[in-house]
Amino acid sequence: MNQAQKRAHWTAVIEQQKQSQLSIKQFCRANGIPYQTFCYWSKRLHSTDTKQTLQPIVFNEQPHSSAEAVVLFFANGIRAELPVALNAAQIKHWVDALQ
């Protein structure tokens, strides 16, 4: 079973547990699933979902601007001013760090 298939399988198992209205321990016992394995996949799938968020960046260019900084506003409320001389790799580094 490849990684995508494992993720799909455990997503379905976790959903089955929620629908069963049994506690996690009861569900695992009834289905022969090691409790620790269930918890591992539940945590892994939940943490992956929260980490993988896509947030658009909107660029508003000022024509003929003599600005010394580029101002970025992030959806999480952070405002960052970066020097206009930064190259794409440096900007990516800052964007990744600030999200």
Image (cartoon, rainbow, N blue to C red):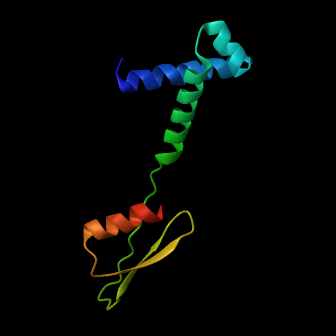
**Residue 35 point in image, percent of width and height:** 62, 19
* Location of residue 97 (image quadrant): bottom left
In the image, residue 75 sits, relative to residue 50, either above or below, namely below
Q: Please report the residue visible at 31 percent of the width from the left and 85 percent of the height from the top.
A: 63
* Location of residue 1 (image quadrant): top left
* Location of residue 20 (image quadrant): top right
Q: Please report the residue visible at 25 percent of the width from the left and 73 percent of the height from the top.
A: 87
In the image, residue 55 sits, relative to residue 30, either above or below, namely below
In the image, residue 51 sits, relative to residue 22, either above or below, namely below
Of 24 and 17, the residue lying toward us: 24
- Horizontal arrangement in the rendering, residue 5 relative to residue 10 (left or right): left
**Residue 89 point in image, percent of width and height:** 27, 66
Residue lying farthest to the bottom in this orientation: 66
**Residue 10 point in image, percent of width and height:** 51, 22
- Horizontal arrangement in the rendering, residue 18 relative to residue 91 (left or right): right
Q: Please report the residue visible at 35 percent of the width from the left and 78 percent of the height from the top.
A: 61
Of 22 and 68, the residue lying toward us: 22
Please tell me how many numbered marks the rendered image carries.
Answer: 0
**Residue 22 point in image, percent of width and height:** 74, 17
- Horizontal arrangement in the rendering, residue 38 relative to residue 1 (left or right): right
Q: Please report the residue visible at 65 percent of the width from the left and 19 percent of the height from the top.
A: 17
